[in-house]
Image (cartoon, rainbow, N blue to C red):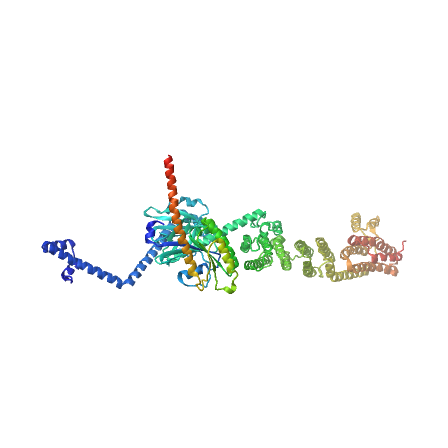
Amino acid sequence: MAESTNPLLVKQLTAADFNPARFVQDATEQCVGGLELRQHRQQIQLIADSTSNELKKNVYRNYQQFIHTAKEIQYLEGEMYQLSHQLTEQRSLLSSLCGPPPATALQSPPTEEPPPPPTTPRPAAPDDLEERRRQLLQLMERVEGAAHIREVPSRYQLYESDLVELDQDTHTALQRVHGYLFNDALMMAVWLPDRRGRVRYKFEALFALDSVAVVNMRDVGSLKNAFKLLMFPETRVFQCATQKIKEEWLEIVDRTKRSKMDAERKQQSARQKRGGGVAVAAAPAESESAAESAPAEPPVGAAAIPEPLFIAEWLLEAPEDLDVFLAQREFEAALALLGRAREAAAPLPDSEARVQQLRSQLAGRRQHLTEALMAELRVEAGRSLQGGPRATRRALQLLIRLGHAGQACRLFLERRSALLRHELKQVKISMMTQLFVHRLSAVVFTSLADTTREFQRAFAAHPNCASALVVWARQELTNFMGTFNKQVFTAKVSLATLAECVTAIRSQADRLREAGLDVRQELDTALLRPVERAVTDARQKQLEAVRLRAAEDRWRPTNLQHAAGVARFQAEMRELGLPAAEQLPDESCRVPLTANTLQFCRSFLSLATELGRLSGGDLTPTVEDALAAVLLAQLQHAQQALQQERYRSERATVLTNGRFLLDELLRAAEQRYRDATGRPCPPMASLRTERSKFPDL
Amino acid sequence: MSGKKGVTQPALHKVIMVGSGGVGKSALTLQFMYDEFVEDYEPTKADSYRKKVVLDGEEVQIDILDTAGQEDYAAIRDNYFRSGEGFLCVFSITEDESFQATQEFREQILRVKDDETIPLLLVGNKCDLEERRRVAHAEAGARASQWGVPYVETSAKTRHNVDKCFFDLMRKISARKAELTRGNHEEVKEPTKCWKCKCQLL
């Protein structure tokens, strides 16, 4: 038998238009009898064998390429899976966008503890719980018989992927499944070959995350990208499409488990704390009293550390909680927490790295808190100073409690200065000196008094800060006196106004003394020189006036003209406090007092009042001497008249006037002075010795 | 295992590595699997390995579950232990604490498996670090004999006794399985008898 194949037959078989039916027909027609047919068959068999051999050789020759292609196909399959998933996800996302109106246009920051997996092949995990729940709902629509998954309200989905379940012993593929990872469980759903609408999978099993053991399977032989679930008595093996997906599964399972564990621990420690009866200052303490009492109460449950290395959960989280409080400007709560944390951290051993870290974190937060509070107190351009003392009280107290009394004191006083400057600007410089000074002093002294009160309230426990207040008050007073002097001690201002202003600030100083700060000594010192000058000026003016009037004096009794004039005279005298003069006018409406005397009476009495007001302290002798000197000048004028020949005929009038000055005016003046100062005026009283010079007739 | 699988697959022995974190469970496993020693320490989550080996002239498969030394959930630990047929209870001879922990691991295993005779080896690893030894050979040996198990000192670094501990354990597992199969046959018969008894009674 010919081993070589018939080339004609090969050509026939490999022809492009090869028709098996016709070939068989031709063969039966050509062949005569069974033998020929069998030969023909043998020939064809030969060709088939050689072809198969050739094919095998071909495969061997291109073995590498085959493997490569197979891998490529597998890889492509994976890609297609991912692509189809992304498409379905996008579709569901779009449908959810088109469907119910989105809750908010802006996505709120994540509120949930476990962070979403960073590189999920699924779209980025939704930001908030609501969204996650909705996603869960949608996905459950795709899984038949999984409605009960949604019965746990806190459950949400973290990860999912297609998987292939393998036989645990032989590692041969069993079925296609889809795995879902929730925050507390793992769900497996079997792939349905005939999909019905949205339903693609059928619920198969749910494993609680805290009891199922997830085991990574090292690649061996044909087994790749697989992991195992151990759930007695079951052991199940699942294969992922790629190494990356497997790593993500394991990574996210592990992380979820850990965060679940953390959450449970936190709950437990919270329960412990509640058992200890200590309300955690998590809620912002809105009143000062709450904030003050919080650090005082020891963290009973937490501080009672059962083991040296046990660190309470809340303590470890304290730095983060502090950040939150700081961000929300709940400084009291922050300080309370800080206090408790430091107290609880104090007995912990330094050797532990966690403790050291905690300490440094707490120290950092304390620094932050201090800075925030100092910023609160600091005077900054553009920031409103409105709000008064109450606005600063909170920050001030917290800062003091933090142990920064010095800074608090400095900032507080700086702030008060700024506030005072601001208030002073509001006081318009008015033409009315008196009014202006009145307002100015009211503002300054009120501010001083307020500051003193606030200071005493805040720094009661820090007496060493009191000197700062004194220095500050002195500085502010000096500033004020500068303005005051400029306004008051000028030539334009009358003595009456001046006396009024000085009295005003003195009474303000008295008020301040009641508030606890005595600045009267300071004030008197500041006033001494200018007032002294003012008194001397007034004395000079009066003496000058006496001299001028004396030059014109003709010692004529005053004619009051008519009854009305008499009445007016009497009223005036009564008002001046010279009731004796009321009896003086006679029937002809004359008074024996000269116009000069009357004028002097008026000006001297007002001088007595005004100087009386200025009198006090070191100024008293100046004031009293001035009064005595002025009166003496007038008396001397009368005495000179007695000795002059040309006034011999007016002697009676001169004597009457002189007596009137010494008897009535002196008494009235003394009265006025006493009213103003509460003291007698000895230099004036000593003038009574002059009385002998004006003998009664 | 069903007979059908038994024909195609060689016998499979499931070994679990237990012990505190950092005693060298993974190092032993990797040395046994791949003849390599890994210096860097990275806590294991849970890894499983499979290898075909020839045990006393017979081809068998070993499935090693390298557990996490630090696993918080007791239920998960139980599931690890339940899946094992034999245990290597590993400690580091340089760390007394890890030796003390073996007691607890054994108790857990016994509780989960509910079997006093479960194949188990007490393994003192890191025996190359003789100068840092904290656990005396005699002390560990005493504990092993108290448990009624062998004590092996190994070094994943020098490969000293690595194969020995795995093979010894597989032998014990294999022997135990043979014992159980015999036991099972007897057990299977008993309920049948009973059922028959009841039938007769009826």
Q: Is residue A550 visible?
A: yes
Q: Is residue A115 left or right of residue A369?
A: left
Left or right: residue A533 compared with residue A252 = right
Rendering coords of residue A621 (x, y %): 80, 60
Q: Observer-nearest residue: A177 or A98?
A: A177
Which x, y percent locates residue B31? Answer: 42, 62
Answer left or right for A284 relative to B68: right
Compare residues A220 and A358 and report the one nearer the observer: A220
Do we see residue B73 in this rendering?
no
Q: Quadrant of the N terminus of chain A?
A: bottom left
Count of residue discs: 0
Please indicate whether residue A363 sits to the left or right of residue B29 in the image: right
Residue at the top extreme of this rendering: B202
Where's residue B172, x and y in %? 42, 54
Quarter of the view holding residue A43: bottom left
Which quadrant of the structure image shows residue A397? bottom right
**Residue drawn at 52 percent across, 63 percent down:** B132
Q: Nearer the viewer, residue A684 or A78?
A: A78
* A258 in relation to A7, above or below: above
**Camera-side residue: A108 or A451?**
A108
x and y percentages locating residue A614 in the rendered image: 76, 57
